[in-house]
Structure formats: C-alpha cells, structure tokens
Image (spheres, rainbow, N blue to C red):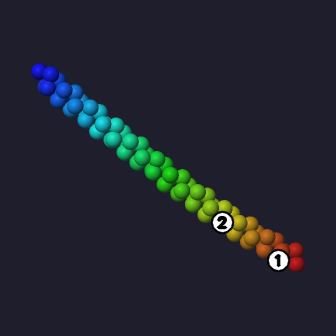
Amino acid sequence: MVQRWKAEELELHKHRLEVESRKQDDFQKQQQAMMQMMAQQQQQFQMFASMQQQQTQVILKLLEKQTK
C-alpha cells in the first residue's frame, strides 16, 4: 500500500511539473509575441516618422518656390 501511495505521489509530482512546464512555455510564447508586436510598432513608427519628414521636405520646397 505504501508503494502504491508513493507511486501516486510520484505521478502527481510528474503531473505538476508538466503543468508548470506548459505554463512556462505559454509565458515565453506570450513574451515573444509581445516583443514581436513591439518591434512591429517600432518599425511602423519609424516609417511614419520618415513619411512625415518627406512631407515636410516637400512642403519646404514648395514654399521656397513660392517665395522666389
């Protein structure tokens, strides 16, 4: 009976470790997804800033032409 109890205890411990491992995997996947999303947002921000800079340059050139 003690041997059976120890086997069940061992099985329970194994199950807990598996659950913890899955939790860690899920957390890491969430972290990776968040980092990827942040990288995409940074890239979009850089593209937006570049577009704004180009628009500003076009406006400045148009203003220069008007003042000449």
Q: Position of residue 20 (x, y in %)?
A: 34, 37
Q: Decide which of 56, 31 is in the foreground and name it.
A: 31
SS under mark 2: helix
Residue 50 numbered tag: 2
Residue sitting at 50 percent across and 52 percent down? 35
Please identify the quarter of the rendering in which residue 15 is found: top left
Q: Is residue 67 left or right of residue 45?
A: right
Relative to residue 58, is residue 40 depicted above or below? above
Residue sitting at 46 percent across and 47 percent down? 31
Q: Position of residue 11 (x, y in %)?
A: 21, 32
Of callouts 1 and 2, which one flags the residue occurring earlier in the amino acid sequence? Answer: 2
**From the image, which quarter does the C terminus lie in?**
bottom right
Relative to residue 37, is residue 17 depicted above or below? above
Q: Circle 1 is placed at which residue position? A: 65
Residue sitting at 15 percent across and 22 percent down? 2
Q: Decide which of 59, 33 is in the foreground and name it.
A: 33
